[in-house]
Amino acid sequence: MSGPVKYHVGAFPPKKLEWEALIPLIGPANAAVARYDGLLKAIPNVSVLLSPLMTQEAVLSSRIEGTQATMGEVLEFEAEEHPANIPTEKRDDIEEILNYRKAMRHAETLLKSLPLCQRVVKEAHRVLLDGVRGHTWSPGEYRRIQNWIGSPGCSMEEARYIPISAGALPEAISEWERYIHQDAPDQLVQLALLHAEFEALHPFLDGNGRLGRMLVPLFMAKNGLLSEPMFYISAFFEQNRDEYYERLLAVSRDGNWTEWVAFFLKSVVEQARDNLSRATAILNLYESSKRLFQEITHSQYSIQALDFLFQRPLLGSADFVAQAGIPRPTARRILKVLRDNGILKVMRVAKGRRTGIYAYAELLNIAEGRPVL
């Protein structure tokens, strides 16, 4: 039986790639990203409209690491204002997903004044692990001990992969940071190499996978591939989880950077198309809903109500009344109109002090990519 795969000391960045195998993929990947970005530039208030896709990305990226919560459960948890009567394991899953969103937004804010650098990475990691499982594992700080990857509870000798030693990590992560800012023949290939190297280094005691995937849209936006850091890649990785891990492992085991880059470029093509399709559907829904909301509510607050629903497609009635910025009597009337016209689906009837829960089913179905309500 062979031992664990060990980190590829001195092999990053790779000195040679098989460009003849990658060139047929590079053009389609860049073209797909450009088409998607064209739509991003056309969407007004893009952070509001694509908010459901950000939540779905947080769900799927966390699912790769073993969480089981669904997007609906995350939104219901928020709508009920963090209810106490759910299993501890489920609560922990949901809070990790919510932290993913917070960490992504924090990184976006930092990148308005900073380059993509170790400081941004550490700050995002600090938020990612704040108050959740792993919060005792040095949030925002690189590990000072050896870690390894394998089945739960396995020894280092039984591990599947052993990252770089803690002593060699500072120089290696600095080399990784320098490569972010180097000129490269193609930025998507550069991003593929950066993602693989980050995962191989495994610089933190927890949260490396989620943070590595978070870096994909951040790099794309900071380097001008996208106008906004809104690229949702985890669906492809989650659907192809075994190959995702095997391609990453093969980088250190076999020095096979080319096959990893090819896999990454294919994921970009697939997800750019999927992102474009869902974002188009969301934009179309928003435009048609603007007219519909105005017609049925006869209210100057109709667009305000619509924007709130796009940010909270599963909401508590009390939250809408209190937080939508609409006068309370008007907010209650708008909720009733939307419910009576079938736009909002009643998930739980208000009773006593317990708030009613409503779902904007059409938007949730688009974000999920399948009928869920």
Image (cartoon, helix red, strand yellow):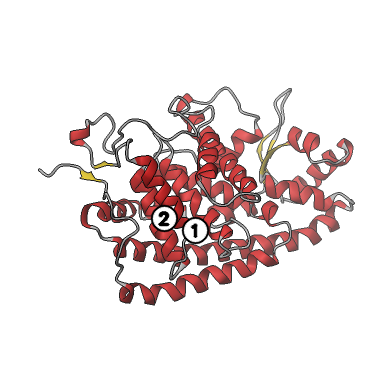
Q: Residue at x 42, y 47 (%)?
A: 174
Q: Is residue 129 above or below residue 50?
A: above
Please state which amino acid type lies under the numbered disc 2.
Answer: Leu
**Residue extending farthest front:** 171
What is the tally of numbered marks visible in this picture? Answer: 2
Instruction: Find residue 183 and report its horizontal and vertical position in percent.
Output: 47, 66
Of helix, strand and loop, which one carries label 2?
Answer: helix
Q: Please tell me whether mark 1 sits on a helix, a strand or a loop.
A: loop
If the image is split into quadrants, where does the N terminus sit?
top left
Residue 257 disc label: none
Foreground of the two, 320 or 268? 268
The residue indicated by pointer 2 is: 194
Nearer to the camera, 130 or 302: 130
Q: Nearer the viewer, mark 1 or mark 2?
A: 1
Q: Give residue 181's mark.
A: 1
Q: At 54% across and 57% down in the image, what residue appears?
A: 231
Q: Residue at x 56, y 71 (%)?
A: 34
Residue 55 shows in the view = yes
Residue furthest left as drawn: 1
Between the residue at mark 1 and the residue at mark 2, the CA separation in whole angstroms equals: 11 Å
Residue 265 in which image quadrant: bottom left
**Disc 1 packing (10 Å; few <14; some 14–19; many ≥20):** few
Q: Is residue 373 visible?
A: no
Task: Tell me residue 59's x, y (percent).
Answer: 50, 44
Q: Is residue 322 left or right of residue 141?
A: right
